[in-house]
Image: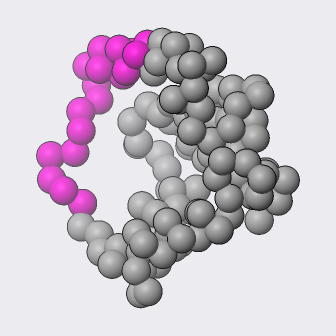
């Protein structure tokens, strides 16, 4: 487990028990939690993905994994902007203290991404079985 998972996995808005329950509900009993569509940080190759915006919260158990994913994307040559909101907990996008800044960052990132004439979404769905 990451440092943020150990430090913030209990007593904040999102607990490790919550994360485990959501994973079980999403995957079912036979799902693969290491599948890259479930855990993109574990993907073998990340090159060729579209630009990414990753917003993290200081007191979120998922923070370190999200920031590590951003670092891996950048190492693979993918444009990835990672922003940490200090003093925030998981779910901060709904907080009156942070939502305006998070919204502005998100809108600017989307405008840059959709202005890029060299990127387009995949034309065919990618096959995956999570359940």
Q: Give the range drawn in magenta.
A: 107-126
Classify the position of the C terminus by image quarter. Answer: bottom left
Q: Residue 76 sits in which quadrant?
A: top right
Q: Can the viewer see residue 34 in this picture?
A: yes
Residue drawn at x 64%, y 26% as measured from the top left: 83
73 in the magenta segment:
no
Viewer-proximal residue among 69 and 99? 99
Viewer-proximal residue among 83 and 94? 94
Residue drawn at x 64%, y 52% as measured from the top left: 14
Residue 118 lies, with reference to residue 57, above or below; the image says above
Number of numbered tags placed on the structure image: 0
Residue drawn at x 82%, y 59% as measured from the top left: 6
Can you give x and y, in whole percent of width and height, for residue 107 in the image?
Answer: 40, 16
Q: Can the viewer see residue 67 in this picture?
A: no
112 in the magenta segment:
yes
Q: Which residue lies furthest to the bottom in this view?
A: 30
Can you give x and y, in whole percent of width and height, for residue 115 in the image?
Answer: 30, 14
Can you give x and y, in whole percent of width and height, for residue 106 in the image?
Answer: 45, 21
Residue drawn at x 29%, y 69% as measured from the top left: 128
Please, which colouring scheme is shown? one colour
Is 127 displayed left or right of 12 in the figure? left
Is 122 displayed left or right of 102 in the figure? left
Q: Which residue lies furthest to the left in this view?
A: 123
Classify the position of the N terminus by image quarter. Answer: bottom right
Can you give x and y, in whole percent of width and height, for residue 65 in the image?
Answer: 67, 51
Q: Residue 55 sits in which quadrant?
A: top right
Is 59 displayed left or right of 108 in the figure? right
């Amino acid at each position: 487990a990451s440092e943020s998972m150990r430090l913030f996995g209990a007593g904040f808005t999102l607990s490790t028990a919550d994360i485990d329950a959501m994973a079980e509900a999403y995957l079912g009993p036979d799902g693969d939690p290491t599948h890259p569509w479930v855990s993109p940080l574990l993907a073998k190759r990340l090159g060729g993905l579209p630009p990414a915006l990753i917003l993290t919260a200081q007191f979120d158990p998922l923070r370190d994994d999200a920031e590590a994913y951003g670092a891996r994307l950048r190492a693979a040559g993918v444009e990835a902007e990672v922003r940490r909101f200090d003093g925030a907990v998981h779910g901060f996008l709904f907080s009156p203290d942070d939502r305006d800044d998070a919204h502005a960052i998100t809108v600017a990132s989307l405008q840059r991404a959709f202005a890029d004439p060299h990127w387009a979404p995949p034309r065919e769905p990618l096959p995956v079985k999570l359940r």
